[in-house]
Image: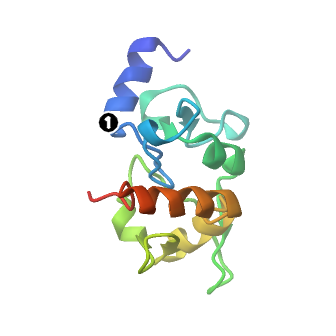
Amino acid sequence: MITAALREKIRQKAGNRCGYCLAQQEYVLNVLEIDHILPMAAGGDDSEENLWLACRACNNAKGVKIAALDPLTKKSLPLFNPRKQNWREHFRWNASGLEILGITPAGRATVLALDLNNVIALMVRRNWIKAGWHPPRD
């Protein structure tokens, strides 16, 4: 069971933003969700080490996925783990700040598996850029 205290601890550790697309809570309509990095259906549990924050779009796209194909190497790789891996080592923003680019095999696989540059994400990010809220500075 995920207690309120554990939820708050995860929110704090995650900086109150999605571990995959970096959407900040203050800019999204839905409450960021607790993501099971290893889904319960794949043997995951509610331990702190298996939990992180995700926006609804990323969490829904991830579903029970734990691996995906890197489009360059065609190898199946574990998805990016926001708890154990550094976002900036696997991803970067394109020049305009609109799209997330995978810069490692796991990053590329995760961009595709979670559809991090879907039409809605791009539309929303475009408006965040206009407002001066995006891309994240840290």
Q: Secondary structure at mark 1?
A: helix
Q: Is residue 110 above or below residue 95?
A: above
The image quarter in which residue 63 lies = top right
Residue positioned 61% across, 35% down in the render: 44
The image quarter in which residue 15 lies = top left
Q: Where does the image place residue 135, in percent across and percent down from the top left?
A: 38, 62
Q: Which residue is mark 1?
A: 13
Q: Is residue 17 above or below residue 103?
A: above
Residue positioned 39% across, 30% down in the render: 10
Number of numbered discs on residues: 1
Q: Where does the image place residue 61, in percent across and percent down from the top left?
A: 70, 51
Q: Where does the image place residue 85, in percent across and percent down from the top left?
A: 38, 57
Left/right placement of residue 94 relative to residue 137 reads right
Residue positioned 53% across, 41% down in the render: 54
Identify which residue, 71 or 124, lies in the foreground.
124
Q: Where does the image place residue 48, in percent across and percent down from the top left?
A: 43, 29
Using the rendered image of the protein, determine whether residue 35 is visible from the camera's viewpoint.
yes
Identify which residue, 56 or 37, lies in the foreground.
56
